Image (cartoon, rainbow, N blue to C red):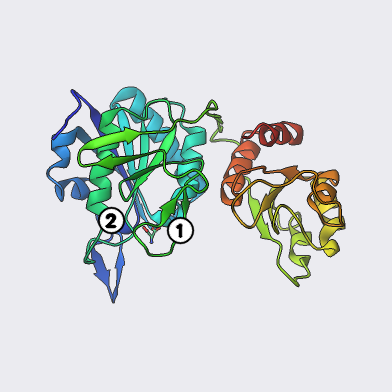
Amino acid sequence: MIRMAGSRVALVSIGGTISMAKKVDSGVVPNLDAESLVASIPELREIAEIKTVSFRMVPSSGLSMADLLALSGEIDRLLSEEVDAVVVTQGTDTIEETSFLLNLTVRSDRPVIVTGAMRDPTNPGSDGQANLIAAIRVAASGQTVGLGTVVVMNDDIHHSIYVKKTHASNPAAFSSFPLGPIGWISEDRVRIALKPVTERLRITVDPGSPEKEVLLFTALLGDSGRLIGHAAELGYDGIVLEAMGAGHVYPSILDTLEKLASTMPVVLASRTRNGEVFAKTYSFQGSESDLLRRGLISARSLDPLKARILLYLLLRSRRSKQEISNVFKNWV
Ligand code: ASP
């Protein structure tokens, strides 16, 4: 067993399937805290010195932005005062959003690894223990220092900028298409094969800043789209528009979108959740060039779920519409 000399890792549990060993009626609910997770796998303590922090006990659909900003602050505190790396265990349903939020808000360069389980501990073939061992190995190896937040699932190491949950139940649900994982775990070895070429964007959110809400709106065939016209009166501060294909919508919402874009950031992303939004290929009414001319901001290659997190953090950090637009413009 390889143990990096002196590596201290904090295991921060926030709930999810990995922690659901208790049956209520016929289903499971979270009940294992960080200490119980570590106690169930004695070999973890042979890989690193582990500090346990039970931060929340919820399914990941029950997490709020306030929970996640508090988690980010707690991770920075642990990394600056007590440990060399942090592993977060949580529900897989929202890992692609939570890990991206941590990537943008944690200030430290030390390793932050997020993991979970697709099958709960009462299920044959449950993957939680294997994922946790792999995540602790990655943390203790120190190989992700400076890489930002990564997600370890099924012996793959994904970068939080690209990782997506692509299946409701398969243990191999996570992918980073079009790139693939940045590394893997084999036996007790941790391999990093790719590193981001750009510097990590860090956003500081003042906890006292006003709460913001970003609407994710999907353009649908045959829909009137009238709901989006109520976004401002419903109190939304920004919108991510999941447009068709490379950034297209039906003509009936164009005037509404133009009006909204003059008062709040409206980010144009693709509902295909893959590939880059176009800028100048089509010029029909409702095309990408039409929408950009009407003041929408291109999400470029950013997945809509992640664009929503980025927009939320930018709004919370009091950036102007022009500054928000510049951040998206510089996104690779
Ligand atoms: N199915 C979920 C999980 O994988 C539940 C959740 O996200 O909390 O953990």
x, y (%) of residue 61?
A: 45, 58
How crowded pointer 2 is (Cα within 10 Å; few <14, some 14-19, many 20+) is rated as many
Q: Which residue is mark 1?
A: 61
Q: Residue at x 63, y 45 (%)?
A: 212
- CB-based contact (under 8 Å), mark 1 and mark 2: no
Residue 77: % across, % down:
37, 28
Height in image: 309 above or below 227? above
Q: Quadrant of the N terminus?
A: top left
**209 vs 73, nearest the viewer:** 73
Which residue sits at x=67%, y=31%?
Answer: 330
Q: What residue sits 85% from the left and 64% below the top?
A: 252
Circle on res. 19: 2
Residue type, numbered disc 1: Ser
Check mark 1 vs ligand 1: CB closer than 8 Å? yes or no: yes
Label 2 secondary element: helix
| Residue 28 drawn above or below residue 209 | below
Distance from the alpha carbon under mark 1 to that under mark 2: 14 Å
Mark earlier in primary sequence (1, 2): 2
Image side of residue 209 versus residue 321, left or right: left
Nearest the eye: 23 or 141: 141
Q: Quadrant of ligand 1?
A: bottom left
Q: Nearer the viewer, residue 80 or 165?
A: 165
Q: Position of residue 26 (x, y in %)?
A: 29, 76
Q: Tag 2: residue type?
A: Ser
